[in-house]
Image (tube, rainbow, N blue to C red):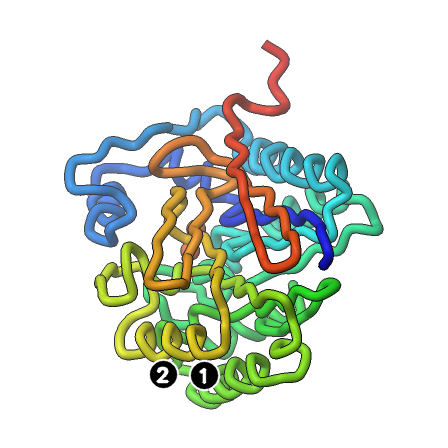
Amino acid sequence: MSRFDFIQVADPQFGFRDRMARIGPQGIASLRAGEFLGPVEPLVERPDPEEDGLAREGRHLGAALAEASRRSAKFVVVCGDMVNSILEPRELKALRGATSALSAHIPIYFVPGNHDTAVDYTAARPTADGLAWYREAFGEHYYSFRVDDTFFLALNSELLMDSSLVPEEGARHFRFIEDALSSHEARTAAQRIVFMHRPLFSGSAARDHLQVVGQPRRQEITQLFRERGVRTVMAGHLHRNVESNDGDIEVIATAGAGYAFGGLPGFRSVAIDGETLSHTFHPIAVDPGSTD
Ligand SMILES: [Fe+2]
Ligand SMILES: [Fe+2]
């Protein structure tokens, strides 16, 4: 049985801190309407409009990558919303600048989020242009890989939300999930772990939440995962830490690395030991680049 660590990052979302520094009452109302914030929950942090948000986001991601090097992690996975807007090349450039600091022998995997697959990221509906942008920037938007005896499946949760603008992509993606989990590589693994941007569910598979995969897809995928022995789904998107269980399936949503709604931003270290998985959230308590 093998033992190794990896680092999970969600929502480094370069450009979001600058957006949040300028958010007005309407923006906050739409966060409440979308269930990112509770009905009366205040924002924990209001970024300073004078601060260079992209540089700060770079330092936050840098802290996660430094931890990956310190632990000799097998890989880093970024679970979506790498940038705030695909129309802002400087955001992708800032992300690339930050990831260039990662040791060359540690691979970094990217998973698509709603902000990375459509210009209108609030619509939860990926577009052909958005997916083309994604492929150009990051490569394939769903894939699998295996490290020792652990099988990993990276999915495009946006296609599970709504593939009406790219129906063939949606159908191909769903077939891929079934095939990948039926493969010899998956069946012979000690455990199967899924990475996606949106949590598959929040609370339980039966509970509705505007930001998780909708029904009937949610029940269908949960059932498929259960049948094929997926026990862990790691996600982001909510910008806060939420751990949910439904039977033997655990969904771990990790707070935003750049900016968080319900507490501090941060990232997660994950330790694999044969058939077991343990994980720890690492909050970024102060600006890791500040000198005061
Ligand atoms: Fe996000
Ligand atoms: Fe998102």
Between label 2 and label 1, give the one nearer the viewer. 1
Residue 164 - label: 2
Query: What percent of the width, then of the height, locates residue 288?
Result: 60, 24
Q: What is the residue that sits farthest to the top in this orientation?
A: 292
First in residue order: circle 2 vs circle 1: 2
- Horizontally, residue 48 falls left or right of residue 246, namely right
Does the beta carbon of the residue at mark 2 sit less than 8 Å from ligand 2?
Answer: no
Q: Compared to 41, does 112 lie above or below? A: below
Asked whether 8 or 84 is in front, the reply is: 8
The residue that label 1 is drawn on is 170
* Image quarter (top left, top right, bottom left or bottom right) of the N terminus: bottom right
The foreground one among 197 and 14 is: 197
Question: What crowding class fits label 1: few (fewer than 14 Cα within 10 Å), some (14-19), or many (20 or more)?
Answer: many
The residue sitting at 51% across, 75% down in the picture is 129
Identify the image quadrant of residue 275: bottom right
Badges 2 and 1: C-beta atoms under 8 Å apart?
A: yes
Label 1, secondary structure: give it. helix
132 w.r.t. 72: above or below = below
* Residue 121 falls left or right of residue 234: left
Q: Mark 1 CB in 8 Å range of ligand 2?
A: no
Q: Amino acid at mark 2?
A: Ser
Callout count: 2
In x, y percent, where is residue 68? 70, 41
Q: Residue at x 63, y 38 (%)?
A: 64
Residue 267: image location, x then y, percent? 54, 40
Q: Quadrant of the C terminus?
A: top right
Mark 2 crowdedness (10 Å alpha carbons): few <14, some 14-19, many ≥20: few
Where does the image place residue 122, in percent across and percent down from the top left?
34, 60
Alpha-carbon distance for marks 2 and 1? 8 Å
Q: Residue at x 28, y 60 (%)?
A: 204
Instruction: Name which residue type carries label 1.
Output: Gly
- In the image, 134 versus 37, the foreground residue is 37
